[in-house]
Amino acid sequence: MPAPFDSPEAAAAATVAVHVRHGESIVNAGLSALLASCPQLRLTAAADDADVIVTDYADALARLAHVAPNAIPLMIVSQREREWDIRTAISAGVHGYLPQRCAAGELLTAVQALGHGRRYFNPELLERAMQHMASDSLTLRESQVLELLAMGCCNKRIASKLDIGVGTVKTHIKSLFNKLGATARTHAVVLATQRGMVS
């Protein structure tokens, strides 16, 4: 049986170059140690030399705001597990998303997947993110109304702040209830908060 690689250079080229830049130093060190232990991966000090960048939520979204979607694939490892956060990251163009509590084996599998042109999202987080995708996609105005609801504003106050009629506010709130599956204003805010749609 022929050897998988004809030379050390070919073997090195087949490995996935990974750059770790997580904002939490302890997490960064742990990720680096785990990834360095995998023969199919090699760490690189420069992001530009990497096939995959493993980072945190804030850094990934900041990078995606300034680079093309087809740039170096980004893998988020984060404690942020709310469905809205995950969906925001997916919409921004992130290639992978793992909870910070994930198993070492899943981390290695995910990074290798990204290194070979695929995407990888933790199944539990992906299911959570997709659960209400069709029903609770809010318009900009509905999002504004929701934020003001979360601040405790009454319909008249919301109308004043958004320069719209009270009747229009009621229409938006009714639509919010339908999309969120809420039965009351407080219920809508609780559901939206759980999903990360409001702070």
Image (tube, rainbow, N blue to C red):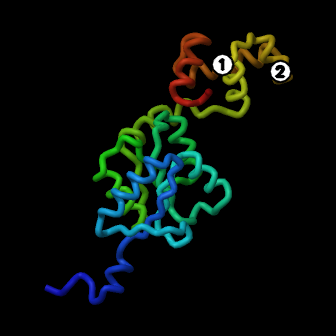
**Quadrant for the N terminus in the image:** bottom left
Judged from this view, the residue extending furthest toward the left is 1
In the rendered view, tell whether residue 46 sits above or below residue 122. below
For the residue pair 35 and 179, the one nearer the viewer reads as 35
Q: Residue at image x 41%, y 49%?
A: 121
Quarter placement of the C terminus = top right
The one nearer the camera, 22 or 111, is 22
Q: Cα distance, mark 2 to mark 1?
A: 14 Å
Q: Residues within 10 Å of mark 1 (few under 14, many from 20)?
A: some
User: In the figure, residue 173 lies in which quadrant?
Assistant: top right
Name the residue at the bottom extreme: 6
Q: Position of residue 56 (x, y in %)?
A: 52, 48
87 over 69 or under it: above or below: above
**Kind of residue sitting beneath label 2:** Lys
Look at mark 2 in the image and give the residue it sits on. Answer: 161
Q: For residue 69, which quarter of the picture? A: bottom right
Point out which mark residue 121 bears: none
**Percent x, y for residue 60?**
56, 52
Q: Secondary structure at mark 2?
A: helix
Sequence-wise first label, 2 or 1: 1
Residue 165 vertical position relative to residue 7 in the rendered view, above or below = above
Q: Amino acid at mark 1?
A: Ala
The residue tagged with tag 1: helix, strand or loop? helix
In percent of the image, x 70 and y 21: which residue is there? 172
Query: Is 159 on the left or on the right of 106, as rendered?
Result: right
On the image, numbered disc 1 is attached to which residue? 150
Residue 124 location, quadrant: top left
